[in-house]
Image (spheres, rainbow, N blue to C red):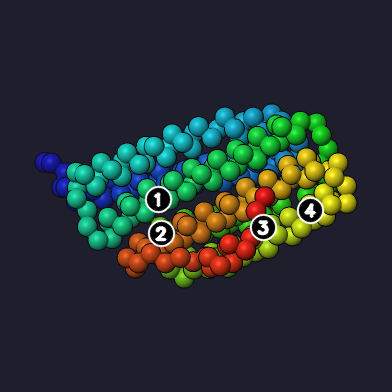
Amino acid sequence: MPVPRRSLFDQGLRNVQDDLLRMGGLLDTAIAQAMQCLAERDLDLARRVVVDDAKVNAIRFKIEQDCVTLIATQQPAATDLRFLVAAMNIISDMERMADHAAGIAKIVLRMGDQPLLKPLIDMPRMADEVRGMIRSALDAYVTRDVDLARSIAKRDDVVDALYEQIFRELITFITEDPATTTRALYLMFSAHNFERIGDRAVNIAERAIFIASGEMQELNDTTAAEAKPKA
């Protein structure tokens, strides 16, 4: 007896969701390892983060192809269509987040054996916060939890505040001793990568709201975003 078309479609949706969550797991590992290799100046781990970025890219392309196939062959409507469209946007954001993690690892490789300019205090907090934001955003996507999705924008304010604190401290180092500029910029660019990961977690939250309500809502205050210091 042939499998009903709806059953095949539901299985396809579950496969997309499972792969998307697996991609989230790879991303979480990449961010944690990026912070670790920076804190410990672990060049071998930094190289691994850069190489493993290809795994994230591969699963992104698989999910995208599966979504396109389901849309083309099953002609989904309403919530199912929003789920697939949102998935394609979410994996694009996650792929860019992984690029930011790899970017931090590449900074570590460029730093080589140069000592850190200052102890890492706020940046590990940024890393922990953005990892939590991603997990919550993916939970909101799976459960269609609008309230959870909205809460992620407030957590991004914490990440932004930490980034601004790091930015001000490093500018002070540069002003007082221009010879520290290169080492200050290494840390500034690393912090900026974490800040951008937080912004993209908010994008995922917006897609979770889109699935549940059918409306696209911008959670970040654009005026505040424009006021952020840029590295």
- Disc 4 to disc 2: CB gap under 8 Å: no
Quadrant assignment for the N terminus: top left
In the rendered image, is residue 212 in sight?
no
Residue under pointer 3: 229
Residue at screen point 19% across, 43% down: 73
The CA span between labels 3 and 4 is 11 Å
In the rendered image, is residue 229 in sight?
yes
Residue under pointer 1: 89
Going by the numbered disc 2, the residue's amino acid type is Arg
- Disc 1 to disc 2: CB gap under 8 Å: yes
Q: Which of marks 3 and 4 is nearer the N terminus?
A: 4
Going by the numbered disc 1, the residue's amino acid type is Asn
Question: Comparing marks 1 and 3, which lies closer to the viewer?
Answer: 3
Q: Earlier in the sequence, mark 1 or mark 4?
A: 1
Local SS, label 4: helix
Q: Position of residue 183 (x, y in %)?
A: 79, 41
Residue lying furthest right = 176
The CA span between labels 4 and 2 is 36 Å
Task: Between residue 39 and residue 18, name the one nearer to us.
Answer: 39
Residue at screen point 78% across, 40% down: 182
Q: How crowded is mark 3: few (under 14 residues within 10 Å), some or many (20 or more)?
A: few
Local SS, label 3: loop
Residue under pointer 4: 171
Image quadrant in which you'd find residue 165: bottom right
Tell me: 77 left or right of 92. Answer: left
